[in-house]
Image (cartoon, rainbow, N blue to C red):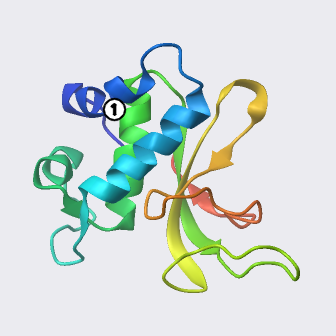
């Protein structure tokens, strides 16, 4: 289970001020995580607490996704973690989507009101294509 706390709320709260549209604030949160944190596969394990990831500003895509979900939940927004692959090859005739590999692991989702679930991986600075995450992807409880 992804735990929340005051440190996560403090990290994210300034981005959600002034009645800003939720999706805009979430995109800035993922962009901030992308900019503030170093990808370091040697730093964390599946048991590393989010507070340690936040304090040291390093981890892997799972840590960054958990961080985003934890921040959103700390602010009172429903969010869930999705584990799977983000399909990054564009459909014929569609613009490309930048990612390290054709299929990039890790994603997370939130529910902004009536708009439904939107997948926004914090390891890139853009939303995942509508084909991601794949049907049947594992999720944590919301």
What residue lies at 31% left-to-right and 68% top-to-bottom? 60
Q: Quadrant of the N terminus?
A: top left
**88 is higher (above) or lower (below) than 28:** below
- Is residue 5 shown above or below 45? above
Q: Give the image location of residue 25, x and y in percent.
A: 50, 33
Q: Quadrant of the C terminus?
A: top right
Q: Residue at point 76% right, 60% down?
A: 130
115 vs 113: above or below: below
Instruction: Specify the farthest residue to the top.
Output: 18
Mark 1 residue element: helix
Q: Residue at x 24, y 27 (%)?
A: 10
Q: Is residue 108 left or right of residue 48?
A: right
Nearest to the observer: residue 1 or residue 65: 65
Residue 3 in the image: x percent, y percent? 31, 37
Q: Which residue is at the front of the view, 94 or 108? A: 94
**Residue at 76%, 73% in the rendered image:** 95
Residue 4: give x, y in percent of width and height: 30, 32
Residue 82 visible here? yes
Q: Pointer 1: residues within 10 angstroms few (<14), some, or many (20+)?
A: many
18 to the left or right of 96:
left
**Numbered label tally:** 1
| Residue for badge 1 | 12
């Amino acid at each position: 289970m992804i735990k929340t706390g005051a440190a996560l709320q403090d990290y994210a709260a300034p981005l959600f001020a002034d009645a800003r549209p939720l999706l805009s604030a979430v995109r800035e949160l993922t962009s901030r995580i992308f900019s503030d944190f170093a990808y370091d596969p040697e730093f964390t394990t599946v048991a590393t607490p989010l507070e340690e990831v936040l304090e040291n500003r390093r981890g892997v895509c799972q840590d960054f996704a958990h961080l985003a979900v934890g921040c959103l939940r700390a602010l009172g927004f429903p969010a869930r973690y999705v584990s799977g692959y983000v399909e990054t090859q564009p459909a014929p005739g569609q613009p490309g989507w930048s990612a390290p590999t054709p299929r990039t692991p890790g994603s997370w989702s939130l529910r902004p009101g009536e708009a439904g679930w939107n997948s926004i991986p914090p390891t890139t600075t853009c939303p995942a294509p509508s084909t991601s995450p794949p049907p049947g992807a594992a999720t944590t409880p919301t």
